[in-house]
Image (cartoon, coloured by chain):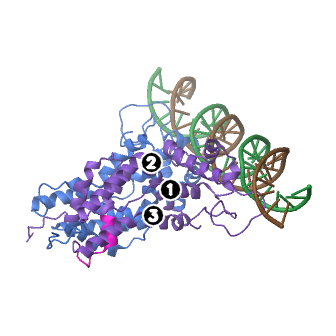
Chain colours: A blue, B purple, C brown, D green
Amino acid sequence: MGAEAGSGLRNGDGDAGAPAAGRPRSGEAHRAILDATLELLQEVGFSALTVEGVAGRAGVGKATIYRRWPSKLPLVVEAFGQLPAFEDIDTGALAGDLKAMLTRYLEDFLSTPLATVYPSLVAERAHNPELGQVLDPVLRGRRRPLEAALQRAVARGEIAPHVDLDLAADLIVGPIAVRLFFRGMKINPGMVDPMVDLALDGIRRSAARTE
Amino acid sequence: MGAEAGSGLRNGDGDAGAPAAGRPRSGEAHRAILDATLELLQEVGFSALTVEGVAGRAGVGKATIYRRWPSKLPLVVEAFGQLPAFEDIDTGALAGDLKAMLTRYLEDFLSTPLATVYPSLVAERAHNPELGQVLDPVLRGRRRPLEAALQRAVARGEIAPHVDLDLAADLIVGPIAVRLFFRGMKINPGMVDPMVDLALDGIRRSAARTE
DNA sequence: ATGATAACGATACGTACAGTATCGTAATCG
DNA sequence: CGATTACGATACTGTACGTATCGTTATCAT
């Protein structure tokens, strides 16, 4: 459950300390398994991914996989952790930061299996609390750059100090999540600018009192 | 693929027209299957739901299920269609409408399997285009009341006429979707008001010019 | 060197479930 | 009343999970 290899009883390559008797685990096999997992996730998606398929693609026995990961799910979680997340970009202004970061992130969705793996893990977590405990820290780390940009904006005075930044981050990411996962819309980098602008300025007409 | 029973070649109970020879399909069995599907979805979630389990719970043979739905997925889609969606509430003001509708909707998440079924279907659709064609119209219908409330606000002058209402709806729903599905947060009706307020007013400080 | 240990790829196995096919039975139409 | 079709039940095939067991190979301790 650590940040390293998972829940195997042995150490793969990093994390020296215990000497360990017998043949050490092959870091090469470890990487081959994760690479094959990502490849197959991209090709067939999560639900059609089989451990036997991963073993075959990686040139590895099934036991070698089950020796490291207790089931298909933790394996996919670890492979998912290697996919790109938000990357912090500091343009000096909130709107510029957000637009640059989101544009970059959406590009990753076109070149990686993020678009299929992400919802699969989320769906599994919906009725699998254990997965949540492993997945949530990963997801939280992925959006930290977004929170950093918002904090810079507070320091700059662009955001009022009382604003809930956690909620603000959800407001920024929300429309993308909805369109990508719930509505299956194609990803178009041109949709980023109006999205960010609306989240920053709000839906309601600012210069009109209703009554 | 219609709005009725799915893709069976016979008609269940509604839609008179063809006389049909032989024993008619049992509407009772139809309902028992859908009810059992929803029960099991709530109990074990989507991925652990088996057609055999549904048949057993419904007191029905497996063939009776496959005679009406070609596979597990369309069955779940139809069961999903019976779950509650947004309900239009007109309070006379945009903020009131949205807060009331979202509060009501979140309550439904606590009393139905919405919270597990929704992400499961979405995940499956991510790498299953056929499902998207069946699911998307259902999802679009579910949020129509939300769009209606936004249109009323435009007519009232609460929203500037040039605002993209489709995007605005995503901005309203986004934070809930993110928190519920991606972050696995508990549902708290008290989170609705600040959520709506932030989406309406925007993240950026309105009375401050950055430079 | 050599023996103990453990991972390696390969493969066989038991279990579970999807989806199909086939029972004998029951309901509806002409 | 006979033709037709759905019914619940059950047997069947195929696939994939997860476990166990091959003989082999790499590393450590002696």
Q: Is residue A43 left or right of residue B52?
A: left
Q: Amino acid at mark 3?
A: Leu
What number is the disc on residue B151?
Answer: none
State which mark lies toward you, 1 or 3: 1
Alpha-carbon neighbours of circle 2 within 10 Å: few (<14), some, or many (≥20)? some
**Mark 3 falls within which chain?**
B
Residue at 39%, 44% in the rendered image: A132
Relative to A75, residue B8 above or below: below
Q: Secondary structure at mark 3?
A: helix
Instruction: Give the mark nearest the N terminus, 2 or 1.
Output: 1
Image location (x, y in percent) of residue B116: 45, 49
Alpha-carbon neighbours of circle 3 within 10 Å: few (<14), some, or many (≥20)? some
Q: Secondary structure at mark 1?
A: loop
Q: From the viewer's side, name the closer residue of A157 and B149.
A: B149
Q: From the viewer's side, name the closer residue of C8 and B73.
A: B73
The answer to whether residue A2 is magenta is no
Residue at 14%, 70% in the rendered image: A209
Q: Which residue is mark 3?
A: B139
Image location (x, y in percent) of residue A97: 22, 66
Confirm or deny contact between disc 1 and disc 3 (CB under 8 A). no
Q: Which residue is mark 1?
A: B82
**Mark 2 falls within which chain?**
B
Relative to D21, residue B35 above or below: below
What number is the disc on residue B112?
Answer: 2
Q: Amino acid at mark 2?
A: Thr
Q: Is residue A107 left or right of residue B23?
A: left
Instruction: Give the mark nearest the N terminus, 2 or 3.
Output: 2
C-alpha distance separating marks 2 and 1: 10 Å
Residue at 44%, 54% in the rendered image: B119
Q: Quadrant of the N terminus of chain B?
A: bottom right
Relative to A99, residue B188 above or below: above
Residue range of the region highlighted in magenta in the rendering: B159-171
